Image (cartoon, grey):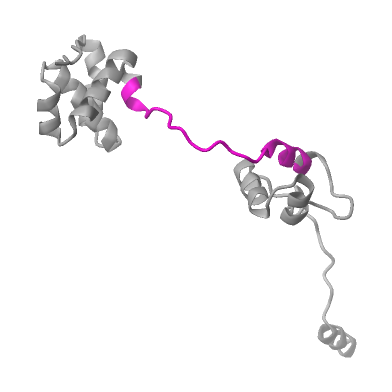
Amino acid sequence: MRIARVIRLSEDQRAQPEAYALGRRVEQRIVERAKVILMATAGKENLAIAAQLGLSRHTVARWRERFAEQGTVGIEKDAPRPGRTPRVDAEEAVRRTTQEKPANATHWSTRSMAKAVGVSEASVRRIWRWHGLKPHLSGTFRSTTIRSSPMEVSLKETDG
């Protein structure tokens, strides 16, 4: 039979989990984890804590173990999860967008950049959005010539 790790806290260490457990603007999952820790310091078993909080025994054991190893930081953040590694190398697209101009245009379009780098348009769009790049927008204000319509020109000539 496995025995749960004993958790003992000093008054200073106990303040943060208590603040989390009673906090109104704290994420619910952190409140739940803090309650697990506080009940564990009271000497309760994992099964009793799980039954009282409506969690599984494994969840209670996980948070108790993580708190024992890492302290308060262990319950504040989730562990990193594995995910698909990005297949697109964004560095080249960012470098070209910020440092080069296409040969036949004033700025890069998603299509031209996708062709130059060898990825899809959607990937270029995603990369630009992630890095906050907007190559179609100029950094300064450009004034344009305002042209009069033929109607305004004819009215001016008759007024004079």
On screen, residue 155 versus residue 83, left or right, reads: right
Q: 148 and 13: which one is in front? A: 13
Residue 126 vs 84, above or below: the answer is below
Q: Which residues are magenta?
A: 74-97
**Which residue is located at x 18 percent, y 16 percent?**
4
In the picture, the quarter occupied by the N terminus is: top left
Q: 22 and 64: which one is in front? A: 64
In the picture, the quarter occupied by the C terminus is: bottom right
Determine the residue located farthest toward the bottom in the rendered image: 158
Q: Indicate the position of residue 10 as horizontal and vertical percent values.
A: 21, 9
Q: Indicate the position of residue 85 as horizontal and vertical percent values.
A: 56, 36
Q: Quadrant of residue 61?
A: top left
Whether the magenta-drawn stretch holds residue 134 is answered as: no
Q: 112 and 26: which one is in front? A: 112
**Which residue is located at x 88 percent, y 90 percent?**
158
On screen, residue 23 versus residue 3, left or right, reads: right
Q: Indicate the position of residue 18 as horizontal and vertical percent values.
A: 21, 23
Q: Indicate the position of residue 55 as horizontal and vertical percent values.
A: 18, 34
Residue 130 vs 13, above or below: the answer is below
Whether the magenta-drawn stretch holds residue 92 is answered as: yes
On screen, residue 73 versus residue 138, left or right, reads: left
**Which residue is located at x 14 percent, y 30 percent?**
50
**Which residue is located at x 24 percent, y 36 percent?**
24
Q: How many marks?
A: 0
